[in-house]
Image (cartoon, coloured by chain):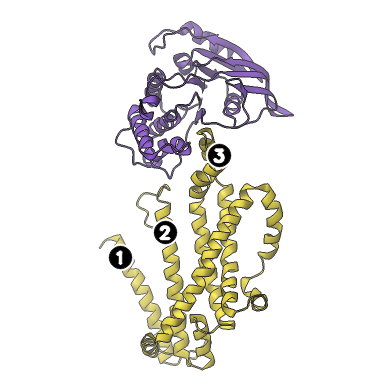
Chain colours: A purple, B yellow
Amino acid sequence: MTTLAQRTTTAEAQAGLGFHLEALSLGYSRDLVLREIELEVVPGEVLVIVGSSGSGKSTLLRSLAGLLRPYSGRVLAGGAEVAATSGDRAMVFQDDGLLPWRTVRRNVELPLRIRRIPRRERAAAAHAWIGRVGLAGSEDKLPRELSGGMRQRVQLARALVGAPRAVLMDEPFGALDAQTRAQMQRLLLDVLRDTRATVVFVTHDVDEALLLADRVVVLERQGIRSVIEVPGPRDPDADRGELRARILEEL
Amino acid sequence: MGARRWSGVVKVASLLAAAGLWQLLTVTDARLWLTFDRLPTLDEIAGEAARRLATSVFYLDLLQSLVRILTGFGLAAVAGLAVGIAVARSPHTRDVVLPLLEALRPIPAIALVPVAILLFPTDEQGIVFITFVAAFFPIMVSTRHAVRALPTLWEDAVKTLGGGRRHVLWNVVLPGILPGLFGGLSVGMGVAWICVISAEMISGEFGVGYRTWQSYTLVDYPAVIVGMITIGLLGWLTSAAIELIGRKATRWLPRAEGSTA
């Protein structure tokens, strides 16, 4: 028998969640952010959404999470219409998504507490994930005692500890300096290798998109401008000049 | 000398200076525009205090006032918290409850004394009721504002981790409003003392307020001052207790470097 800690930190995680967007419009009647978009998110893929600010990247992500109801159209997750939030679709926010009164350990344990996982199992899983994101020894610190990069590591551990089938990331490294951002990207790639969760990642950084994505969706003027396949393997040193130029042109 | 120690010296010196000025004005029976000739001197007050402290009535009064205030304030804290959260989070509750509360809020609690006398079988319950009403509003209003000021991000985070309304309440709303709530509790405790003492002066047997007023009607001025000092100390102690608990409960708040306030 495997423990929860093993299950959530190894490849035994559940299969990723697929999304199907049908004629989806988001926003308010006179002020639609996205109009009748169609999109398929393949289970287990890393889909990166890029677009200039105000293009509706975060809005789209919030509707996948169930935090925002469609103005019209539907969002299906694993074949079922998304009507509310679920622990199966964990979200990582840009900054300050941690509960400031909870220590690192208690923030990471939160999704397991919500699911009434017994204390001992909860502690073991949190411990494993805190180590996995490189924060062993900081378990009892409060968020205000951590740097921006460390806080995002905690958010990552908290999102993944419950073995969600999809992770929705809203510019998670957007507020970090270049060096920390590169470290976090490497950590994310490393962690993703062990999970089968689908990842939808929002960024405005084209290089970040190319590094992480299986596919890149370019949003523009209320719709999807293009969907670009990024051939693997993911490698920070790979030369993707041609793709980069293409995406920048689309933007 | 360290800045901290110096600050302590200044605080003590300030109190001593005020006491010295009082002594000067009362010993010389000063009749300026204000008249001090009937007010007791420090030694008269100290003598009276020593006499009072040796009687059991003093402690009975103290206990009675404390029981009243802690009952009224405790009920107000629970009710103010519950109503404040309900009104801020449920539009339906807000529409039902808020107009009524907003209509009652401007009425000073002490103006409810006649109603309290008519409403309750005993004076005791009336006094607790008035204390309750006094403390309820600041606690309810500060809770409501604190709930509304919560960033939606924390709620979104808990929801996308699988949490429902109950989880949001326990893990986001209750801890998140503590800084604002303690502000309300502090103000609530202040007005609760004002009202319990005033209510005791109007009706009641026993209680620091009752004793102080009785001393005045008996022309026992040193005892009046002893009563005032007792009330001041009680108010200060209870406020300090709230302050202390509040600071412990909100240790996660970012604090300015080197701040001691």
What percent of the width, then of the height, locates residue B14?
37, 73
Q: Nearer the viewer, mark 3 or mark 1?
A: 3
Please tell me the numbered disc located at residue B174.
none
Residue under circle 2? Answer: B245
Same-chain check, marks 3 and 2:
yes
Same-chain check, marks 1 and 2:
yes
Residue B28, placed above or below residue B107: below
Q: Are marks 1 and 2 in contact (CB under 8 Å)?
A: no
Q: Earlier in the sequence, mark 3 or mark 2?
A: 3
Label 3 sits on what residue type? Gly
| Label 1: chain letter | B
Residue under circle 1? Answer: B6
| Label 2: chain letter | B
Image quadrant assignment for residue B111: bottom right
Q: Earlier in the sequence, mark 3 or mark 1?
A: 1
Residue B231, placed above or below residue A51: below
Residue under circle 3? Answer: B164
Tell me what residue is drawn at x 56 percent, y 47 percent: B149
User: Which quadrant holds the N terminus of chain B?
Assistant: bottom left
Task: Kindly state the secondary structure of the residue where label 1 is placed.
Answer: helix
Q: CA distance from mark 1 to mark 2?
A: 27 Å
Q: Earlier in the sequence, mark 1 or mark 2?
A: 1
Q: CA distance from mark 3 to mark 2?
A: 29 Å
* Disc 3 residue crowd, few under 14, some 14–19, many 20+, Cα 10 Å: some
* Disc 2 residue crowd, few under 14, some 14–19, many 20+, Cα 10 Å: few
